Image: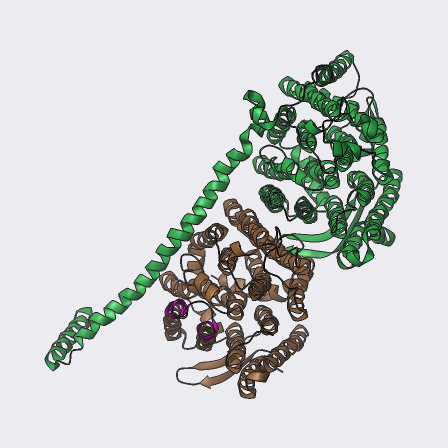
Amino acid sequence: MNVSLILIILLVGAFATYVVGDKLASKVALFFSLAALGCSVVLLNHFLAGENISLINAWITQPKISFALNADGLAIAMLLLTVALTPIIIFSSFGNEYKIAKAFYALILFMAFAMTGTFLAADGLLYYIFWELALIPIYFIALIWGNGDAEERRKAVVKFFIYTLAGSLFMLIAFIYLYQKAGSFLIDDLYKLNLSATEQLWIFLAFFLAYAIKIPIIPFHTWQANVYQKAPTVGTMLLSGIMLKMGLYSVIRWQLPIAPLAAKEYMNIFIALGIAGVIYGSIVAIRQKDLKKLLAYSSLAHVGLIAAGTYTLTIDGLRGAVLQMIAHGFVVVGLFFAAEIIFKRFATREISEMGGIRIQSPKFTSMFLILVLASVALPSTFNFVGEFTVLYSLSQINIWFAVLGGTTIILGAYYMLKMFQNVMLGEANTKTFSDVTINEGISLVAIIAVLLFFGFYPKPITDLITPSLETILNVINKN
Amino acid sequence: MEMDTNLALVLVLAPFLGFLINVFFGKSLGKTVSGIIGTVTVVVSFIVTLFFFNQITSTEKAIQITLFDWIQISNLKINLGFLLDQLSVLWLLFVTGIGSLIHLYSISYMHDDENIHKFFSYLNLFVFFMITLVVGSNLLVLFIGWEGVGLCSYLLIGFWYKNQDYNDAAKKAFIMNRIGDLGLLIGMFILGSMFSTLDYATLQTAIAGATNLNIPLLSLAALCLFIGACGKSAQIPLYTWLPDAMAGPTPVSALIHAATMVTAGIFMVTRLNFVFDLAPDVQMIIAIVGGVTSLVAATIGLVQTDIKKVLAYSTVSQLGLMFLALGFGAYEVAVFHVITHAFFKACLFLGSGSVIHGLHGEQDMRKMGGLRKAMPITFWTMLVSSLAISGVPFFSGFFSKDEILLTAFHHSIPLYVVGSIASIMTAFYMFRLMFLTFFKDFRGTEEQKHHLHESDGLITFPLMILALLATFGGLISLPGNSWLNEYLAPLFTKVAGEEHHLGTTEYILMGVAVLGGLLGIFIAYIKYFKQDNIPESDEKITGLTKVLYNKYYVDEAYDTLFVAPVNALSKFFRDYVETALSAFVLGLGKVTNEIGFQGKKIQNGSIGLYLFVFVLGLCAIVSYIFLAQ
């Protein structure tokens, strides 16, 4: 048994979904996404039992490109994040009407396929292909099924597409350069390269451009808020829940170990950039009028902290970053889903037109509040575990990094509670807010359950990712 | 050991179970059952606490329980675990004891509220987090409770969520607390990196065994921890949330914002006494902050007209006195005052709740008066508690406050004076409250007058118990013969007992304090009984009174200094910086476009030009190769 099975399920699922037609598409897509989740859990068990589920197959001989998938603990954690969120995201869209539904759901599965590939790929070019493949479905999802004025949407989406594509091209150049040196794209060969400091700096920067745009790190974030707002919620969830983690994951997997000298030399600058994102994102979020945009900026703030954690080059920083990636993935999907639930009832995303929901739907309010509290990293939620670990790692580099990064716990509480108050509390809204449906409830409860369970017991994930992170740190510190 | 673990789990989880039941089934269970479940679960915790108390007093051995690994950090391993020792059990006694009484009281007080089951679920959740805070065996478990009680405080201040002013108050409380929490986190980071542990017991051993301690760094940690305490225990500069927190239902004010949660800061400092003892500079800061807070809050309390606001500022002021004691390393004295204060302040708040209840929501003392006859039990219990807080012998507050002032006298005369003035003011505003509320004629509407009545037994019973405790609570630590000091002695490195020989100085100071208290009461008597003054209506207030009435305009200052600039910055970022950055990226796109457009012109089909460029390029390459060799 090996890990390529998951990729096959997702890819076959995408085709099957398209073939069965509009009526059944959503159900078939859900089925395949759940099958992928089930298989991933089985694979996890095999992995934990010590079985090797990675693989290397020769693919193209000239230039030498391999179909190599590396399923270490870190990759499996990201795989699980992807295949756990995909069914939730698909299920959350049940009850919505989409034109050409078969294409819509096929694209979701295809995107899950590409993102999974990105997390697993152990060959630079294969990785690059998956990385770019993931962009195509989200481009169409946002363009065709998005909301708002069509022309404005097209502008925002095309800008996003070109921007990220342009950034990634620098990464491609870096890979080609590395291939020239190593004669292979295999990650282990790239790890073994002895590059000079100057070479590393250029490689590091080329990677950085690709990742900084994807994650995004300020000031490369300008595509984000608009696309998050204009994409359909499913697209926003895919982007914020999983896709931006591709960038963060790649920092750990590719950028740091391939160019460790540059990473060490300029560590403080990149940590500072991440923290600047925390403060900037939080402050911009305070005065947002559109709920989805507010969540977009809060996301900017959170990933800034995660990025800062990765650049500490310490086990705590990396571990905290990965934990926080997973926690953030769940909470942000939950929050965007909540925004969608409100939109379905009030037909607006303007915060000023909301309010008075609590009196109409206490259940939804409780669930929304738990998500808000997880987002502000209240202890006993998963997000606290990640945030605490990252902040601790920052404090070990420089106490001021922790203080400045820590402002997120104040500013985050400020904009999130302000939003909660304006969206949920107050006198009853003139518009009726019908209670959450069972389907909606299932998705929200699933997310909340994950956030609370790992809030108290993150050990399984910590144990899963720690060995791979230590291996990567060894590569980073080999010189 | 097994049994201890199970009992400890019952202790912690009983209120949590109450929370779950009320959340999921509260509505269908009905108002009374919901309240009974809420109360019984806390009583269960109280009974378990009594068991542990008995065990601790007989064996004098702390019980350490580890459940499982929680957060893993390279040099830190953080468990979810409990520590039941003298300090935590003592705290549990009054948290669960007073908690039970207040739950009982709430069954009646909240009976007309349609969301009473929500109220009890939040109250239970609060008790759960408060117990977690107290029994945690390391700082991070304390932090779960610490932020958890903050959350419950947020939920309960904003309990009547239709009112956006209340929601503002709730939000303010949460955010101000989080400013403190950042301090607490940073303090933890420093301690963690210095000693590789956040576990109390291990930390104490590590510090005791350390050679070459980095005292400046340790002091920084202590200072950061104290910032955390300032947030939770409402000390300058993070105190302004507490008076606003009175927006919550009165039982909440009694339980959370007087007796228990706000003492968390004092608990934490006492818990980490071995850290603070090594940081005398920080201790000095704590004493000064405590002293100044006690005085500033007392001055504001002098002129407030809302009965709950008076009590709120009084709470801030009394907490200040406790920090004054902490600053001088007199932990047992601070703890003593925490306990007596919990008794009399809970009683005062619940009494004010009884009054408010009787007047159908009226909180303005200008519209009260003469309630003595209609509400005798409320009156007598509040009177007893007022005597206690004013330091009249031999009520509980007399002993505890006296010890604080004695301690202050031995360390710093100016702070002793500050504390004494605050105490005189306390006596004054408390009796101002009593005279305005209970004496002379009723100043409310005829309608209200008609309905005046004593509250029912569920309300008066807790009042009477608390009044008894407020009267006799001082017995736990009599000067020269203190049960409390002996009980707590194992916690502190310093030898206790040296400061408790009663000499002439002590008796003189005691006399001065008593006279001061009586003076305050006397002035209130002259002003509000003899002369029958009623505080002026809001618009007529002028001069210094106006400044005090408006709380020195600190809220306004914070708004101008912090909230407004952050919001302006947010707007600036949103409207300008974001647009500019976006334009820059689009500009890059345009430049690329332009290059393409200009480049297109070169490809104009003229073979001559192509050939020219080709030859030029060839020459360049050849000469490069030639020169390179």
Chain in green, by letter, is B
Q: Residue at x 72, y 25 (%)?
A: B433
Where residue A177 appears, as percent x and y from the top left, is 36, 72
Q: Residue at x 33, y 59 (%)?
A: B584
B152 magenta-colored: no
- Residue B36 can be seen, yes or no: yes
| Rendering quarter of residue B95 | top right
Where residue A115 appears, as percent x and y from the top left, is 51, 73
Where residue B58 appears, as percent x and y from the top left, is 89, 39
- Residue B476 can be seen, yes or no: no
Quadrant that contains the N terminus of chain A: bottom right
* Residue nearest the observer in this picture, B198 or A163: A163
* Residue nearest the observer in this picture, B237 or A347: A347
A157 magenta-colored: yes
The vertical placement of B85 against A90, above or below, is above
Drawing shade for chain A: brown
Magenta segment, principal secondary structure? Answer: helix
Give the magenta-colored segment's residue range: A141-167
* Residue nearest the observer in this picture, A251 or B301: B301
As drawn, the residue found furthest toward the left would be B608
- Whether residue B595 sits left or right of residue B140 in the image: it is left
The vertical placement of B396 against B12, above or below, is above
Colour style of the rendered protein structure: by chain
Where residue A246 appears, as percent x and y from the top left, is 50, 68
